Amino acid sequence: MQISVIIPAYNEEEVIADTLKEVRGFLQENFSSFEIIVVDDKSTDSTLNIIQTLPDVKVVKNLKNHGKGYSVAKGVKASQGDLVLFMDADNSTRIVELKKFLGQNKDYPIVIGSRGLKDSDVQIKQNPIKAFLGKAGNMLIRILVAPKISDTQCGFKLFNEESKSLFDKLTIERWGFDFELIFLARKYNLKVKEVPVVWRNNFDSKVTWLGYVSTLLQVFKVRWNNILGKYN
């Protein structure tokens, strides 16, 4: 199978159908074989009911709410594609951006979308508090776990067969899994290519300001895990 697209979802009833319709259409036009895997993280709204009625969608269900990192890793383990892309259910970065990645993945096991490069196009910005916390967080992440990466947290990342094994080593179940993946890639000498994307902020995002603080604390967890040899 050419590609698997993993979409973690939690209470996305207002947007999930449109996102999946767009993803399915793009994949049908550009790939001879594909699968779409939606991992429902124990939604309390109609998300699960909606995705179960849609064509060409494989549904994976969490028995309790774990977080985005856990859900993405579970989707990757259930996937069969030679390439694996994970993206956000709210369509902040649209599937069409994948075209920019496909020329890069021959030389780079991991290609990640970025909102922090010169040619990145952030069309709808976050509120000032979240923007400030995001910038502060990026600075800490770059210093401690991901040097030379301007944006580890954009939820649009492509992995080849070689790099899929990184998901087996994840210890963070929630938002910090993104930079844990980048840290692991560096540790195991897997090259990462950062590509500018078009990104639109979703004002109904599930990430709260407290979530930002919690995620930053997970930076230190990654460093501590490495000291303890948990990634060996």
Image (cartoon, rainbow, N blue to C red):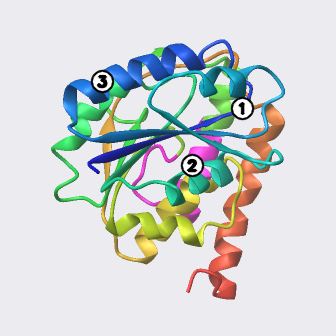
Q: Is residue 125 highlighted in magenta?
A: no
Amino acid at dot 2: Met
- Mark 2 vs mark 1, foreground winner is 1
Amino acid at dot 3: Phe
Q: Which region shows up in magenta?
A: 135-152
Residue 195 in picture, x, y percent from top left: 30, 40
Q: What residue sits right under mark 1 in the picture?
A: 10
Residue 162 seen in the figure? yes
Amino acid at dot 1: Tyr
Q: What residue sits right under mark 2 in the picture?
A: 139
Q: Residue at x 48, y 23 (%)?
A: 20
Quadrant into which the C terminus falls? bottom right
Residue 16 in picture, x, y percent from top left: 58, 20
Under circle 1, the secondary element is loop
From what the image shows, is residue 54 above or below residue 62?
A: above
From what the image shows, is residue 27 above or below residue 78?
A: above
Of label 1 and label 3, which has the lower sequence position? 1
Give the spatial CA distance, label 1 vs label 3.
23 Å
Residue 121 seen in the figure? no
* Side of 67 where 116 appears, left or right: left
- Front residue of 38 and 146: 38
Q: What residue sits right under mark 3 in the picture?
A: 26
Of label 2 and label 1, which has the lower sequence position? 1
From what the image shows, is residue 55 above or below residue 186?
A: above
Of label 2 and label 3, which has the lower sequence position? 3
- Mark 2 vs mark 3, foreground winner is 3
* Side of 147 where 25 appears, left or right: left
Q: Residue at x 57, y 61 (%)?
A: 180
Residue 153 in picture, x, y percent from top left: 54, 43
Q: Residues within 10 Å of mark 2 (few under 14, many from 20)?
A: some
Q: Residue at x 71, y 76 (%)?
A: 224
